Every structure is written in C-alpha cells, then in structure tokens.
Image: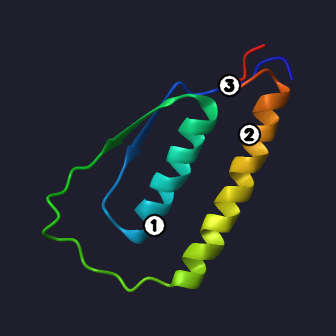
Amino acid sequence: MDDLVVFQTILLGTDGSATARIAEHAATMLASATGGQLIVVSAFDGSSVKVEEVDVEKLHAKIGQLTLENDFLEKALGRVGGPNGRR
C-alpha cells in the first residue's frame, strides 16, 4: 500500500431524516478516526420534513455495521501510521 488517501475535510449534506442521521453518525466516526474536519450543511427550513416512523431494529443493525466498519478503519489506519494514516 504505497499511498493511502485520507480525507482532511468531510462535507455532509443532511435533510434531517433517519437515513441522514445514520450518515451523520458515520461521518462523525470517520472524521474522528482520521482526525479530519466534519462540515455539516443543510438547505431546508424543516417545515417540509415529515416525521418518519423509524424501524429501530434496522437502525440498530446499521449502527452495528457502522461500528464494525469504524473498528476496521481504526485498526487499518493504526497499521499505516496513526490517525491520519501518515508514517
């Protein structure tokens, strides 16, 4: 592995939905694991957001998957030289 690309800035767009919250969680964990900056943007006023019924079991499964992915990234980045992937 000659070059490892690590993002210094992550830009996340959100609409306040349940799936956006999952993306927010994943982006937060990725930025934390890599030492990157997270910028969250939104272009809605909230008045058109519908309250969704959330399938808690699906969300828990997704959070578990993201946790496994985060653990993998954390270990992989540690092997290549620290939180920013630099040797």
Disc 1 crowd rating (10 Å Cα; few below 14, some 14-19, many 20+) is: some
Query: Mark 3 against mark 2, which lies toward the viewer?
Result: 2
Task: Name the element at disc 3.
Answer: loop
Packing grade of label 2 (10 A; few <14, some 14-19, many >=20) is: some
Q: Amino acid under label 1?
A: Thr
Q: Earlier in the sequence, mark 2 or mark 1?
A: 1
Crowd rating for badge 3 (residues with CA inside 10 Å; few <14, some 14–19, many 20+)? few
State whether residue 67 is above or below residue 38: below
Identify which amino acid the numbered label 2 is placed on.
Glu
| Quadrant hosting residue 63 | bottom right
x, y (%) of residue 27?
51, 46
Q: Furthest residue to the top?
A: 87
Which quadrant: the C terminus? Answer: top right
Mark 3 highlights which residue?
5
Residue drawn at x 80%, y 39% is: 75
Per the image, the residue denoted by label 2 is 74
Tell me the quadrant of the picture where the N terminus can be found: top right
- Residue position for label 1: 19
Rendering coords of residue 39 (x, y %): 37, 36
The answer for how far apart the CA atoms under marks 2 and 1 are is 23 Å
Please say if the residues under marks 3 and 2 sit with CB atoms less than 8 Å apart: no
Q: Secondary structure at mark 2?
A: helix
Residue 59 location in percent, x, y? 55, 74
The reply, left or right, for residue 35 in relation to residue 82 is left
Q: Which mark is residue 44?
A: none
| Picture residue at 62% right of the left edge, 69% below the top | 62
The tally of labels here is: 3
Kind of residue indicated by mark 3: Val
